Amino acid sequence: MSKIEWTNNIKKTFNKVLKSRTFKYGTNSIILIAAVVAIAVVFNILVDMTQIKWDLTPNKLYSIGDTTKKILKELDKDVTIYGLFDESRISSSSDKEFVELLDQYAKYSHVTVEYVDPDKNPGILKQIDPENVLKDVSKSAFVVKSGNKVKNLSYYDLFSTYFDQQTFQTHVTGSLAEQGFTGAIKYVTSEITPTIYFTTGHDEKDVDKNFTSLKDQLVNNNYDVKPVNLVVEDKVPEDTEILVVASPKKDLTISEKDKIKEYLKNGGKAIFMFDFLELDPQFPQFENILMEYNLGLNYDKVKENDENRHWPQNPYVVLLDVKSSKVMSDNFNVLMANSRSISTLKNVKEYIEVIPLAKTSSKAVGEQVDKSRGDEIPGPLDVAVAVEHKGWEKISKIVVVGNSSFLEDSATDAFGPYFSNNLIFFLESVMWMRDKKDDVIISPKQYTRQWIDITAEQANYMGIIVAIILPIIILGLGTFVYLRRRHL
């Protein structure tokens, strides 16, 4: 074969390959793949240059909610958030959640975020807090400052935790970061910090031991929360915004009753929470106060007989309806265990407005603790009631709840998402009493694992689909494509 013939054969073969459908489709595939890769590369470069980020976590751990956005947008004072740790830690996994979240705060004109290492800047704490208001500020903490007001958020204040009584270990269950930072901003930019007092001296539950989640919510809404023993006080403290009585097991003294009545008659506000008590102590002094508001205290235990309205196999853990009213902003449910009911007296007075807050179904009953008191109390039962008293010189408001355990820390895991509703119930009661609607209600963001609950039968079906049916389908499609390509 001559050189010319050999060259012509090469050209014919090359032209044949170029004109073949296989080459054309193959080339199109390569071009398409190259285009997709190029688009992906360009897209990543643009995202990196513009710092665009998406929070794909289930509970939006790295994003701020609408409530926070509204507060930040309405800020009229400059706020600085100091992270007291080395900047090299910012990329670590333990701090990434907070740093990413604070990036959202820093987008607002009145908020500045700075990271400073106290070891490298020995005078920084004195500069931030010249009056030494913050007694113990540890490294890794955050300090929020506006003007001369400062608030410290320790590293552990930004997590919700659960203590396992069996293993004696503390487990981190969620994030309180947004709740903490937004609450601190509200605190340092507010002119006045009202005080909510929890009474002591009657074997009440301790706010610092039993209600830490509730206390955190109140503190984040710019309240001081303190205990008060009215036995040793001349009167209810002057700075009392709201007086809270949380599950007393002993009655008031006559002197204490008189002090509380005097406080209420002068426009005072109070929240009374009475649990069902097995020993059935009597509370005539408390009842004397409640009568002024046309309310009575029942000595019963609420039992819900509607199976759709109580915990499985436990009719004493009741799902209660909360209806929208001048107290509550919306309809929702709260979950309460071992409650007593509250009665409204028939002595109607035009200057007293009784507002039912939480009710059982009509199938519920109040089982008398002392059977000699009479028959069961038929439902529907009021387990929480609000009252506005306009008969004195100043308007007085109270809320009476036949339960306190629904707000305890132990209810966080026991009641799951209903615990957030329980907190909202208390906070909205506080907001109504103060005629305020700008308190921060931000629920903790729980760390959740994403999984699908399936039965053993469903697992077997899925195994058959994945191990047998899908491979057969893929093999069949592959064979079909191969045979079709052979005829192109």
Image (tube, helix red, strand yellow):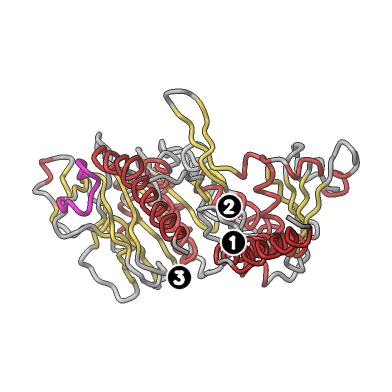
Residue type at tag 3: Ile
Instruction: Give the label, 3 or 2, closer to the camera.
Output: 2
Residue type at tag 1: Gly
Tell me: residue 352, above or below residue 402: below
**Percent coordinates x, y for residue 141 in the rendering:** 72, 42
Instruction: Tell me where residue 317 sits by quadrant.
Output: top left
Q: Does dot 2 land on a helix, a strand or a loop?
A: loop
For this rendering, which residue is in front, 141 or 259? Answer: 141
For this rendering, which residue is in front, 353 or 62? Answer: 62
Residue type at tag 2: Leu
As drawn, is 436 to the left or to the right of 149? left
Rendered image: mark on residue 26:
1
As drawn, is 308 to the left or to the right of 394? left
What segment is highlighted magenta in the picture?
Answer: 305-315
For this rendering, which residue is in front, 359 or 386? Answer: 359
Question: Measuring 53% from the left and 44% from the top, which residue is drawn there?
Answer: 174
Question: Measuring 73% from the left and 61% from the top, which residue is drawn there?
Answer: 5
Question: Measuring 48% from the left and 24% from the top, which residue is drawn there?
Answer: 168
**Percent coordinates x, y for residue 122 in the rendering:** 90, 39
Q: Rate crowding at label 1 as few (under 14), some (14 to 19) or many (20 or more) other CA atoms within 10 Å.
A: few
Q: Is residue 314 magenta?
A: yes
Instruction: Give the label, 1 or 3, closer to the camera.
Output: 1
**Percent coordinates x, y for residue 33 in the rendering:** 63, 60
Residue placed under numbered mark 3 in the picture: 395
